[in-house]
Amino acid sequence: MQSIHDLTLAGLREAVTGLGEPAFRAAQVFQWLWGRRARSFEEMSNVSKGLRGRLAESFSLVRPEPATVLTSKDGTVKFLLRLADGEHIETVLIPEKEHYTLCLSTQVGCAMACTFCSTGTMGFTRNLTHGEILGQILAAMEHIESAGLPMGLRNLVFMGMGEPTQNLDTLLAALGTMREEGGLAISPRRVTVSTVGLPHTLARFGASGAGLLAVSLHAPTQTLREKIMPRAAQAMPLDRLVAELRAYPLKPRERVTIEYILIGGINDSEAHARDLVRVLSTFKSKVNLIAYNPSKGSPYEAPVLDSVLAFEALLRKKNVTTILRRSKGQDINAACGQLVTAHAMENPSA
């Protein structure tokens, strides 16, 4: 049975009218699903009993449910969410100064096989549905309330499992649902979508106005990118990626966020920093530097602190806006894919 959470508002109107009800009933059901996070059709008290019964016969209210919830000593909360078909994904609640940011997944596994990423070792299983993408937000909101956490959810970053632009149609539909008043009402200004940069996707996402763009670069040359991100580098060579970023539509104060994971002895030298400055010189950007957090069995090592600070200092000296991100949740395997991988190893038949 299809989950009703997989319907957009337009799809919900079609379903409601198909059941012989006026279209305005869809807005009522929509508010119960996303604004009030209803767990049963019976909760929908302003919806007629007849419609509630017909909806229950046609749809389920299934959505991602926590299988494991881990809380770090720094306040990071990592969820292993179980999907209806038994697959698992991760979402991570990250504490900021006055709010939480939620890191969401868009796929089960990932086809990009980046060599430094735990999710990349899993391979690709399937895309998430509309309801599975948005269900991560509902799970996080319910946890914030039930655990009595001190802050609310404000920002969303699609930087979890999977390559978002390989599930772009569904992602854009989910972002549309996310904006609707009466539901989650989350502004595109609070949404960032991270991509390795695949052909025919950046311009489309930019034209949608559905969120801010972040690009997982991680290497300042095509040769090095082919080494550590072979599929991404082959799909979109660095010179073409830069050309597309030059043409990317930005509002006056917007910049493309460039994500750069510093891997010890691989991409963290001052020479790499100078190469990165040259790459970034032709379009508006800011850089998030992240020290690599190795997982068990990783072929790479974390960078030494002196290298991280020297890399950051060189970028700043060249007037590149740079933010050094502190890795959070290391004590709970909060890097992307680590918890799913650990679960699979512990439950090989699951």
Image (cartoon, rainbow, N blue to C red):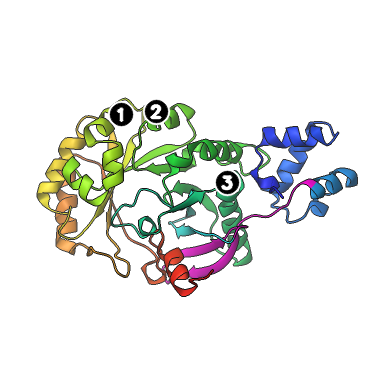
CA distance for labels 2 and 1: 8 Å
Q: Is residue 60 magenta?
A: yes
In the rendered image of this protein, does residue 6 appear above or below residue 254?
below
Q: Is residue 320 visible?
A: yes
Mark 1, residue position: 244
Asked if the residue at tag 1 contacts the one at tag 2, i.e. Cβ–Cβ closer than 8 Å, the answer is yes
- CA neighbours of label 1 inside 10 A, class few (<14), some (14 to 19), many (20+): some
Residue at horizontal 44%, vertical 32%? 205
Residue 165 appears left or right of 80: left
Q: Which residues are magenta?
A: 58-85
Residue at the far bottom: name it: 346
Instruction: Please rate how many residues cluster around mark 2, counting C-alpha atoms within 10 Å: few if below 14, some from 14 to 19, many from 20.
Output: some
Q: Earlier in the sequence, mark 2 or mark 1?
A: 2
Side (left or right) of 327 relative to 93: left
Magenta run includes residue 184: no
Give the SS element for disc 3. loop
- What amino acid is at disc 3? Thr
User: Which residue corresponds to mark 3?
Assistant: 129
Residue drawn at (66%, 40%) of the image: 7
- Quadrant location of residue 196? top left
Residue 322 horizontal side relative to residue 141, left or right:
left
Q: With 53 as the anchor, is 66 left or right in this view?
A: left
Q: SS class of the residue under badge 2?
A: helix
